[in-house]
Amino acid sequence: MDPTEHIINLDEIDHGIFRSLPFCHGYCVTCGLCSSSCPASGLDDFDPRKLVRMAGLGLKDELVNSKWPWVCTMCGKCEHVCPMGIHIPDLVRNIRGLRERDKVPGILQKGIEAAIKTGNNLGVPKEDFIFIAEDVADEIAEEPGFEGFKVPIDKKGANLLTTIHNKLVNTHTEDLKHWWKIFHAAKEDWTITSDNWEGTSWGLFTGDDESVKIMAGRIVEHMNRLEIKNLMWPE
Ligand code: SF4
Ligand code: SF4
């Protein structure tokens, strides 16, 4: 092996590439506490300390094309123990955001594109969503103590708007019932919306700030249009 093969030319390092606050990876003292605390350490050889060092050395392409940023769960344990206060999950998210969108792993990018286009990650049409919501409400109404239960949709002036995780209208409708029965028992004045009801924003995980902004903006728009006072955004 050519011993010079892996030598990094310090003159060619782009130190600025990941250097936006608050992650300050340049302060890393290589203590390894992040690696010791990380639940994902060792998976696909992932090592947060090495990731921070690579960022410090400006190895942008190596990081962006690596599996490592996608192995991280973004749990935040590393930054909790880091003596230098380096925000590793923010750094990871920043690296993820630099990857070409068609190379984002798994279904995340597909879900984001569906959400931007249809208002939810699964692309459930509005009429299907309303049908499912009302069907779930009918099932609740059959239970003792919930007679006459209805799901409020697009209720103007409600006290509380709740967003919905897509899986709750797909495979986990029982979980919708738990929330809605609590609202009923608490005599809450609540509502859901018929459009753009998605509560998850997968751009948060893929470093896609633009999609996060769009998804959050839609919820703000609901709050303003329907004059709702409080938001419950469980995701
Ligand atoms: S805990 Fe902080 S200072 Fe220590 S190796 Fe990890 S990033 Fe560097
Ligand atoms: S945020 Fe990522 S790097 Fe940090 S401890 Fe959690 S999994 Fe490990």
Image (tube, rainbow, N blue to C red):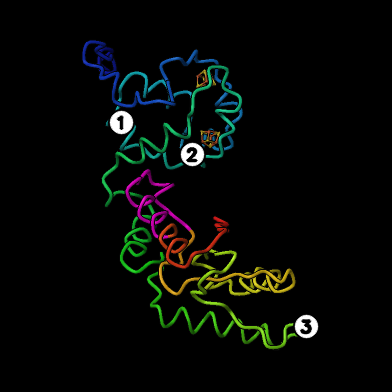
Q: Give the residues in magenta.
A: 200-218
Q: Is mark 2 within 8 Å of ligand 2?
A: yes
Q: Secondary structure at mark 2?
A: loop
Is there CB contact under 8 Å for labels 2 and 1?
A: no
Most common secondary structure along the magenta stretch: helix
Q: Which residue is mark 1?
A: 62
Instruction: Give how far apart the Cα atoms at labels 2 and 1 are.
Output: 16 Å
Q: Secondary structure at mark 3?
A: loop
Instruction: Give how far apart the Cα atoms at labels 3 and 2 are.
Output: 45 Å
Which quadrant of the rendered structure holds the N terminus?
Answer: top left
First in residue order: circle 3 vs circle 2: 2
Q: Amino acid at mark 3?
A: Gly
Q: Amino acid at mark 1?
A: Glu
- The reply to whether the magenta stretch includes residue 170 is no
Q: Which residue is mark 3?
A: 145
Q: Which residue is mark 2?
A: 72
Q: Is mark 1 within 8 Å of ligand 2?
A: no
Tag of residue 11: none
**102 and 232: which is toward the camera:** 232
First in residue order: circle 3 vs circle 1: 1
Q: Amino acid at mark 2?
A: Cys
Judge from the rendering whether residue 90 lies leftward or rightward of residue 4; answer left or right: right
